[in-house]
Image (spheres, grey):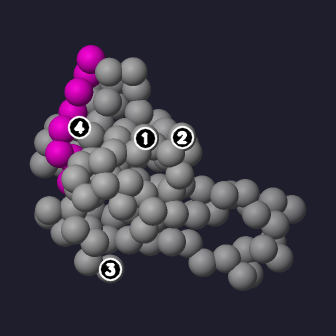
Amino acid sequence: MYRQVLLSKIHDAVVTEAVVEYVGSITIDQDLLDAANIVPGEKVLIANLANGSRLESYAMAGKRGSKEVCLNGGAALHGKPGDQLIIMTFAVLTDEEIKKHKPTIIRLNAKNDIIK
């Protein structure tokens, strides 16, 4: 049997920009992607803690050290600068793989610095 489980999570990311005139996705500082084990182009589930919106998109690499978390295209209609997000990825694993699996979880402060 296979199950879908949490692979990676960026908790409390703060939206720095929302740009509707863009071809979809969410741009995230490459340093944050690396720390969370998320690769550019990977499907992400985005939960907005400010308005309850949940949407799927894909991650795009932003400039290293920029701390940017930018909602692009249609995703920009689901949040605004200052909103807090949870950004998640998932993996499909067997029951045996799940026993050894530990998701990568990072938590950010209000400036999108990694605190945990």
Residue for badge 4: 79
Distance Cα–Cα, label 2 vs label 4: 21 Å
Q: Is residue 106 above or below residue 70?
A: below
Name the kind of residue labelled 4 in the image: Gly
Name the kind of residue labelled 3 in the image: Lys
Distance Cα–Cα, label 4 vs label 3: 24 Å
Is any part of residue 64 visible from this angle?
yes
- Disc 2 is placed on an element classified as loop
Sequence-first tag of 4 and 3: 4
Give me the disc on residue 116.
Answer: 3
| Residue at point 45%, 62% (across, down) | 34
Give me the disc on residue 41.
Answer: 2
| Residue at point 55%, 45% (across, down) | 42
Q: Say which quadrant the C terminus sits in.
A: bottom left
Is any part of residue 56 visible from this angle?
no
Q: Say which quadrant the N terminus sits in.
A: bottom right
Sequence-first tag of 3 and 2: 2
For residue 84, side relative to residue 89 (left or right):
left
- Disc 3 is placed on an element classified as loop
